């Protein structure tokens, strides 16, 4: 285990001596997930527009993928395989390596509030990129759970007859569409927040690319 | 008008060869793995519309064929779609077609003949009174459109599995195809054709099927999306040669299961 103190500023370190923050499998699954999730969102927007769950909410066609409903469905059900299998690999390696427990826990509401207030005041430290702050921990856990909800509600919509348990869990076919849309909105909010934070702390982008 | 029964059980060599050739001709199958690896980089780097790219389209169509197989695997021939009570019926039930309601075809019931052909021993035409005399079943089920909306309706008609057996259909064949009076065409897999809730319907909500819902008959499958349910059917045929479908040939998924 690396015991280097995080107080060392990375600019003085050579890349090879810097501690590895994200293992290769994590970086690969992260980017594959980002790719698949974005395809799902943009093609899903076009599918949603074919018959909006909320008549007042329409996704601008210019930011959707697929050109028309049939094309969007092809994209959606192609990226679906990548999202699901990549997600399974991600969760399995995360749990098997123990990373899941060391990175995301302990997590406390008080800690989340403290770090959130510190972030608002601009006083949240990003000195040690190996350590997630409480807000990060919560956000990443929420988005992992949200992706699971998206897949399950999507399966309930896709196969409402073949998966009766999922259908009932979602409250029926029509409610599964509401769940799917709301979970997508949560994911969209996460993407905006996540990309904003990366823009504010650009080093986090480099660590997700190079691992250090 | 019976053809010798032996002919049906013989392998349809021409159809098998045609099918194999179709599959082999799809270069997308071989490119599948390659594209899977490079598609991501390409689509993110290029600024042009990737939806119009031919190779991307071939890839997506190949995945759609894979999804047909995945759905055939998931399809449980004994799993029933949920049924509903009379009070849950959507009123009015929406009209939906690839044309407006003013262009609904008018079919003359007296002159109407249903042609049944392909891999069946009883190749013949049926009049409406003959069809109406077949065993009757009713169902109140949810129609799910590929667009996402759904509506609950009540259909009456004859179980399609019984009809296929009555006409001596080769139930080991792969497909059942349909041609319609509105130039729509569609095809389904044999397991779905034999599903207990697959109904050749002549009635809607206790009345004769009105023109807007597909007079004189619609194949109703609560296990498939709306576009798989053909209306105004004038010909039914059993085949091993992939027949495609009106929307399917434009990019909708063929299996279209629910």
Image: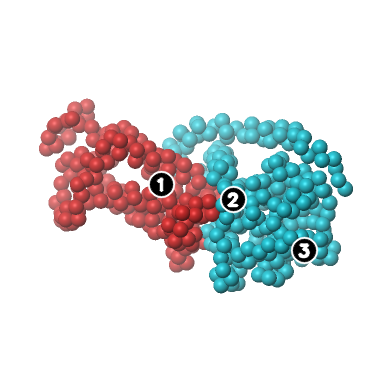
- On the image, the x and y values in percent for residue A93 come to 33, 36
Q: How far apart are marks 2 and 3 (CA)?
A: 26 Å
Q: Do labels 3 and 1 share a chain?
A: no
Residue A6: image x %, image y %?
Answer: 14, 37
Q: How far apart are marks 3 and 1 (CA)?
A: 51 Å
Q: Which colour scheme is used?
A: by chain
Question: Among the chains, which one is red?
Answer: A
Can you identify the residue that label 1 sits on?
Answer: A37
Q: Residue B176 carries which label?
A: none
| Percent x, y of residue A121 | 15, 56
* Nearer the observer, B107 or B16: B16
Q: Which of marks 3 and 1 is in front?
A: 3
- Residue at the spot of label 3: B132
The label nearer to you, 2 versus 1, is 2
Q: A200 or A138, which is in the foreground? A: A138
**Residue named by callout 2:** B78
* Residue at the image position 74 percent from the left and 43 percent from the top: B170
Colour assigned to chain B in the rendering is cyan
Q: Which residue, as the protein is rendered here, is positioned at the far right? A: B1
First in sequence, mark 2 or 3: give its number.
Answer: 2
Q: Write down the quadrant of residue B22 in the picture.
A: top right
Q: Label 2 is found on which chain of the structure?
A: B
Residues marked 2 and 3, same chain: yes
Evaluate whether residue A28 shows in this view: yes
Name which residue lies at 47% across and 37% down: B39
In the rendered image, which quarter is residue B105 located in?
Answer: bottom right
Badge 3 element: helix
């Amino acid at each position: 285990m690396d015991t280097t103190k995080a107080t060392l500023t990375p600019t003085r370190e050579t890349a090879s001596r810097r501690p590895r923050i994200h293992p290769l499998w994590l970086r690969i699954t992260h980017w594959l997930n980002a790719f698949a999730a974005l395809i799902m969102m943009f093609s899903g927007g076009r599918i949603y527009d074919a018959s909006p769950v909320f008549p007042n909410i329409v996704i601008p066609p210019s930011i959707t993928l697929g050109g028309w409903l049939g094309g969007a469905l092809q994209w959606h059900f192609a990226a679906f395989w990548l999202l699901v299998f990549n997600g399974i690999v991600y969760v399995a390696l995360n749990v098997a390596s123990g990373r899941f427990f060391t990175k995301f826990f302990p997590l406390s509401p008080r800690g989340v509030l403290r770090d959130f207030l510190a972030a608002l005041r601009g006083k949240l430290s990003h000195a040690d990129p190996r350590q997630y702050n409480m807000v990060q921990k919560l956000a990443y856990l929420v988005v992992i759970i949200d992706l699971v909800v998206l897949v399950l509600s999507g399966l309930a919509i896709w196969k409402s007859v073949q998966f009766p348990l999922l259908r009932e869990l979602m409250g029926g076919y029509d409610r599964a569409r509401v769940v799917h849309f709301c979970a997508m909105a949560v994911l969209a909010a996460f993407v905006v927040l996540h990309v904003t934070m990366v823009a504010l702390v650009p080093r986090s982008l480099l660590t997700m690319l190079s691992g250090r | 008008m019976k053809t010798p029964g032996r002919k049906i059980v013989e392998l349809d060599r021409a159809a098998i060869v045609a099918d194999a050739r179709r599959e082999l001709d799809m270069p997308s199958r071989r490119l599948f793995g390659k594209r899977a690896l490079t598609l991501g980089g390409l689509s993110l780097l290029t600024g042009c519309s990737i939806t119009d790219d031919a190779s991307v389209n071939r890839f997506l169509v190949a995945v759609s064929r894979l999804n047909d197989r995945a759905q055939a695997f998931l399809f449980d021939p004994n799993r029933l779609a949920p049924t509903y009570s009379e009070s849950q019926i959507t009123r009015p039930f929406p009209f939906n077609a690839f044309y407006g309601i003013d262009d609904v075809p008018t079919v003359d019931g007296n002159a109407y003949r249903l042609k049944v052909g392909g891999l069946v021993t009883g190749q013949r035409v049926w009049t409406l009174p003959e069809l109406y005399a077949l065993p009757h079943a009713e169902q109140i089920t949810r129609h799910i459109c590929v667009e996402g909306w759904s509506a609950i309706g009540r259909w009456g008609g004859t179980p399609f599995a019984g009809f296929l057996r009555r006409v001596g259909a080769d139930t080991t064949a792969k497909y059942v195809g349909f041609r319609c009076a509105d130039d729509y065409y569609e095809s389904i897999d044999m397991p779905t054709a034999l599903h207990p809730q697959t109904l050749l319907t002549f009635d809607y909500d206790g009345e004769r099927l009105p023109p807007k819902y597909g007079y004189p008959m619609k194949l109703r499958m609560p296990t498939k999306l709306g576009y798989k349910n053909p209306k105004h059917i004038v010909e039914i045929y059993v085949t091993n040669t992939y027949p495609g479908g009106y929307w399917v040939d434009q990019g909708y998924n063929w299996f279209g299961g629910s």
